[in-house]
Amino acid sequence: MAVVRDLRTLLRLGNFRRLLAVRLLSQGADGVYQVALAAYVVFSPEKQTSAAAIASAMAVLLLPYSLVGPFAGVLLDRWRRRQVFLYGNLLRALLAAATAVLIVVQVPEWLFYASALCVTAVNRFVLSGLSAALPRVVDDERLVVANSLSPTAGTLAATAGGGLAFVVRLMVADSDAAVVLLGAALYLCAGLASLRLGRDQLGPDRAPAHPRLSTALSDAVRDLLAAVRHLAAPSRREAAWALGAMTLMRFCYGALLVMVLMLCRYAFSSTTEDGLALLGLAVGVSGAGFFAAAVVTPWAVGRLGPGRWIAVCAAAAAVLELALGLPFAVPPMLVAAFVLGLTTQGAKIATDTIVQSSVDDGFRGRVFSLYDVLFNIAFVGAAALAALMLPPDGRSAVLVVTVAVVYGAVAAAIGRFERQ
């Protein structure tokens, strides 16, 4: 396979291997930590979990990406990237260990969330630094392949970390604190792995002078506003419509995820262990849908075009989510998890394609930063709406119908735009 051949070629590059090791350990730790946080918030036997608590946890996990993300590059261009990996991961290891202590001593909720928020905020700098450092370890000829394979490997590492967290929580130690400590250990390993790279090897190159930090941050705000104006141009209407559609589909996915968490916790299981195992199965099935989307979408986009494929994904989600969601039973829920994983990721791949092909190169990075902000704010907003609508056991026909209507509206709007 071409992918395997490309990966073998890249792995012959020693510095790429070292940088990839930092990514795999960092994102594997992210997966462990995020599952531990979800398990503590949703499945602790001593807690009566509410949809509001789940929404708070999602805000902790995702808002730092939205608030810090657009400004991360400004600071990364001032700091040695190797040092960001070293001190960033060491700081996360320390903060994650502190989170474990807070779980054990059962402190007030706000203090726990503050600790978790600090851990996830640092993550944005590490991930942005990993992308920025890649051209320093790969030549121009292999950079496109490296940009494709390296983030994919990181996503797989995060998924594997989440799976490891489920296994540890269910089979080794019935303690959320123990799982958090496992994440802390992986963060520590990621920091130590960065020492195999030279202090100045990953850049950035030192410019004669940097603008003042306040000026650089205000420039970042202006850059985001310029990206909005760029998307508003008539020649880029398709990219703007695709971003809007993907934001709404992400909103739907977030609302349904909160519902599934509540169903696994209360309606579909009698014990927290059974609920956690069911959630792990649902996450795995949804991940299989993401993988299926990566296989199916290139063919579908080639036949239909990316815009029409987004409309098909939204329409399929509208029909199948309604049919599979309303019975509120485990087998249909698992099928729905696969379908929604496939349609959500399929639409995202198509949206990425439209943005990459429609947006001028000089604006592409800024538009993707805006995309990242919209993506995560939609997810958190969906969790907040679900918190208002869901009953204690998670069974809400109103939420299922509402989400189906939103999916249907997206399909109709994109379909109409493509016809015009």
Image: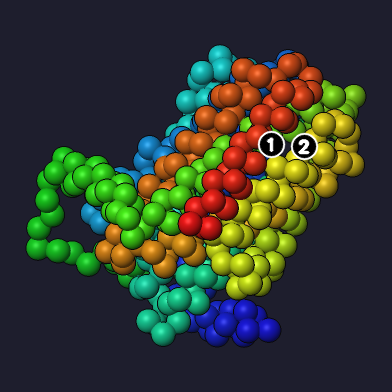
Distance Cα–Cα, label 2 vs label 1: 6 Å
Q: Tell me the SS state at disc 1.
A: helix
Residue 281 lies in what quarter of the image? top right
Classify 337 as above or below 295: above
Residue 111 position, x and y percent, is 50, 20
Give the crowd class for mark 2: few <14, some 14-19, many >=20 residues within 10 Å: some
Residue 272 lies in what quarter of the image? top right
Of 162 and 191, the residue lying toward us: 162
Q: Are marks 2 and 1 in contact (CB under 8 Å)?
A: yes
Label at residue 322:
2
Give the crowd class for mark 1: few <14, some 14-19, many >=20 residues within 10 Å: many
Does residue 394 appear anywhere in the picture? Answer: no
The disc labelled 1 sits on which kind of residue? Ala
Total labels: the figure holds 2
Q: Residue at x 29, y 54 (%)?
A: 233
Q: Tell me the SS state at disc 2.
A: helix
Is residue 417 toward the left or the right of residue 405 in the image?
left
Of the numbered discs 2 and 1, the one sitting upstream in the chain is 2
Q: Residue at x 89, y 42 (%)?
A: 331
The residue at which mark 1 appears reads as: 404
Residue 82 position, x and y percent, is 37, 60
